[in-house]
């Protein structure tokens, strides 16, 4: 399967910066079209940047949202529904990112509800899981990740509409990356556990996330059961984002 190179722009940038970033990404891919043989590209800007960013993107780059409401529609001030995300031609939505779990106390149950409404809209849910540093030090990483994943996955999950992103919390935005042995162990474990929930679990894309950059991408992509990356900081510079794809 092709690697998914997914950029999570988080809460960064002005409108004009977002548009320039999209233009630079498209330009960089046009200059190296052979990258499309091995990679699918996705960018996930803040909600209100989605439409103008998409106007700059070519077919080669898909667009997604960073979250959606667990509710279908109605009086939920501040929320954006999966239907609205779909309506502006997004193909993906990131759900259960550790920043949302940490700062907005999102539970597995809530992530599961969000994934259900996303699937109803034919969106691919990128469900994020990952342990904290304390949990890893206590040797609980597999237990934590298995519980998060199995409880966050709804019955509607299939190999086509679901991507799992393993992002150790201690590696996000910190410059620390898990060792390739740690990534291999966790991705093999996730693949095995997924079979309890999803038919054809071998076809589910498993992304690694946490301080991925051009300098460490090649060794990460070489790990068995790594099918792409969810990239935060390095996705904000077209050169780095494309540099990561070049390593695949
Ligand atoms: P990072 O973020 O690449 O800046 O570590 C990854 C993520 O949070 O998805």
Image (cartoon, rainbow, N blue to C red):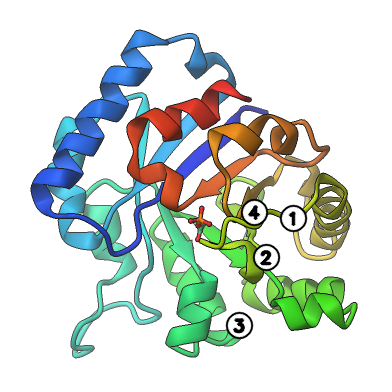
Eyeballing the image, is 21 above or below 185? above
Q: In which quarter of the image is residue 54?
A: top left
Check if mark 1's residue and mark 2's residue have beta carbons within 8 Å.
yes
- Looking at marks 1 and 3 on the same chain, the residue that comes earlier in the sequence is marked by 3
CB under 8 Å between callouts 4 and 1? no
Whichever of callouts 4 and 2 sits on the residue coming sooner in the sequence is 4
- Where in the figure is residue 118, as x and y percent of width and height? 43, 64
Q: Can the viewer see residue 156 in this picture?
A: no
**Marks 1 and 2, Cα distance to the nearest angstrom?**
8 Å
Marks 4 and 2 in Cβ contact (< 8 Å): no
Q: Which of 211 and 130 is in front in this view?
A: 211
The residue located at (70%, 34%) in the rendering is 221
Q: Is residue 109 left or right of residue 30?
A: right
- Rendered image: mark on residue 178: 1
Q: Does the residue labelled 2 lie within 8 Å of ligand 1?
A: no
* Depth order, front residue of 70/233: 233
Q: Mark 4 or mark 2: which is in front? A: 2
Task: Identify the residue under disc 2.
Answer: 168
> Earlier along the polypeptide chain: callout 4 or callout 3?
3
Mark 1 residue element: loop
Instruction: Mark yes or no: residue 65 visible.
Output: yes
Q: Position of residue 49 (x, y in %)?
A: 17, 53
Whichever of callouts 4 and 1 sits on the residue coming sooner in the sequence is 4
Q: Name the residue under label 4.
A: 158
Q: Name the residue under label 3.
A: 108
Real-space CA distance between mark 4 and mark 3, rounded to the nearest whole angstrom? 18 Å
- Tag in front: 4 or 1: 1
Inter-mark Cα distance, 4 to 1: 28 Å
Q: Is mark 3 on a helix, strand or loop?
A: helix
The picture quadrant where one finds residue 194 is bottom right
Residue reaching furthest to the left: 16
């Amino acid at each position: 399967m092709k690697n998914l190179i997914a950029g999570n722009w988080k809460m960064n940038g002005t409108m004009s910066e977002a548009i320039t970033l999209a233009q630079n990404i498209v330009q960089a891919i046009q200059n190296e079209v052979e990258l499309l043989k091995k990679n699918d590209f996705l960018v996930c800007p803040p909600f209100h940047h989605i439409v103008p960013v998409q106007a700059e993107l070519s077919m080669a780059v898909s667009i997604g949202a960073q979250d959606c409401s667990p509710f279908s529609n109605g009086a939920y001030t501040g929320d954006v529904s999966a239907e609205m995300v779909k309506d502006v031609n997004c193909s993906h939505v990131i759900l259960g990112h550790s920043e949302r779990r940490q700062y907005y106390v999102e539970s597995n149950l809530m992530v599961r509800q969000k994934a259900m409404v996303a699937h109803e809209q034919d969106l691919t849910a990128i469900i994020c899981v990952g342990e904290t540093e304390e949990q890893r030090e206590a040797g609980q990483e597999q237990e934590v990740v298995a519980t998060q994943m199995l409880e966050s996955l709804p019955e509607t999950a299939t190999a086509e509409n679901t991507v799992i992103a393993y992002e150790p919390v201690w590696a996000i935005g910190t410059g620390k990356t898990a060792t390739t042995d740690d990534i291999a162990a966790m991705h093999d474990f996730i693949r095995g556990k997924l079979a309890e929930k999803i038919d054809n679990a071998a076809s589910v894309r498993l992304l690694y996330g946490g301080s991925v950059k051009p300098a460490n991408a090649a060794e990460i992509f070489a790990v068995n059961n790594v099918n792409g990356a969810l990239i935060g900081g390095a996705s904000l510079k077209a050169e780095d984002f494309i540099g990561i794809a070049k390593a695949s």
